[in-house]
Image (cartoon, rainbow, N blue to C red):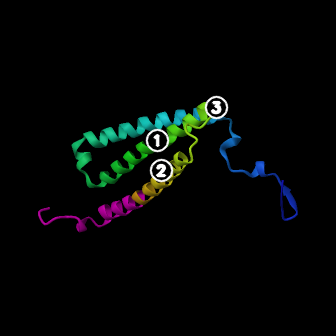
Amino acid sequence: MLMINDTFVNDDENSLSMSRFPRQIRYWSYLVSNIFSLICTLLTLYFLLFDRTLRNSLNNHIIIILLLIGLLYEFIDILLIINNDANDIPWSSSPTFYLFWVFFDYTFYSLQIGLFAWATIERHILIFHDQWISTRNK
């Protein structure tokens, strides 16, 4: 129990952890959503990479990079979370592993946010200021 402003608050009720949901529900929700996400990501990458006009289009380059980063995140981080929920024990309990996991999470979140911001600026330039990138031969 924690006393805040003369009222008693239970720490367990106010925790923002995912422990409110049973592990099996978390496991199946992550697994099903990750399967659909992987299918959508791989199909989108397939169409963007194997169609020459889409691949050469300047506005799709950043989208391809964002999809590849998202795919890496899904294969590494989400699978570790699914494994953690399925086995009820951590894959590795070493502090080095968890430091790497946290570093990986924050690095990829920051990278995706930065690249998405760059993509919005790039799209704005390509749509409203196309004369900035046009050549004399055009």
Q: Residues within 10 Å of mark 1 (few under 14, many from 20)?
A: some
For disc 1, the marked residue is 76
Decide which of 125, 63 is in the foreground and name it: 63
Magenta residue span:
116-138
Q: Is residue 134 above or below residue 73?
A: below
Q: Earlier in the sequence, mark 1 or mark 3?
A: 3
Query: Mark number for residue 99?
Result: none
Going by the numbered disc 2, the residue's amino acid type is Phe
Q: Residues within 10 Å of mark 3 (few under 14, many from 20)?
A: few
The residue shown at (41%, 43%) is: 72
Decide which of 16, 53 is in the foreground and name it: 16
Q: Is residue 79 above or below residue 116?
A: above
Going by the numbered disc 3, the residue's amino acid type is Gln
Q: Is residue 15 above or below residue 26?
A: below
Q: Is residue 96 above or below residue 134?
A: above
For disc 3, the marked residue is 24
Label 1 element class: helix
The residue shown at (62%, 35%) is: 89
Label 3 element class: helix
- Locate residue 69, reporting x and y percent: 40, 48
Label 2 element class: helix
Type of secondary structure dominating the magenta stretch = helix
**CA separation, marks 2 and 3?**
25 Å
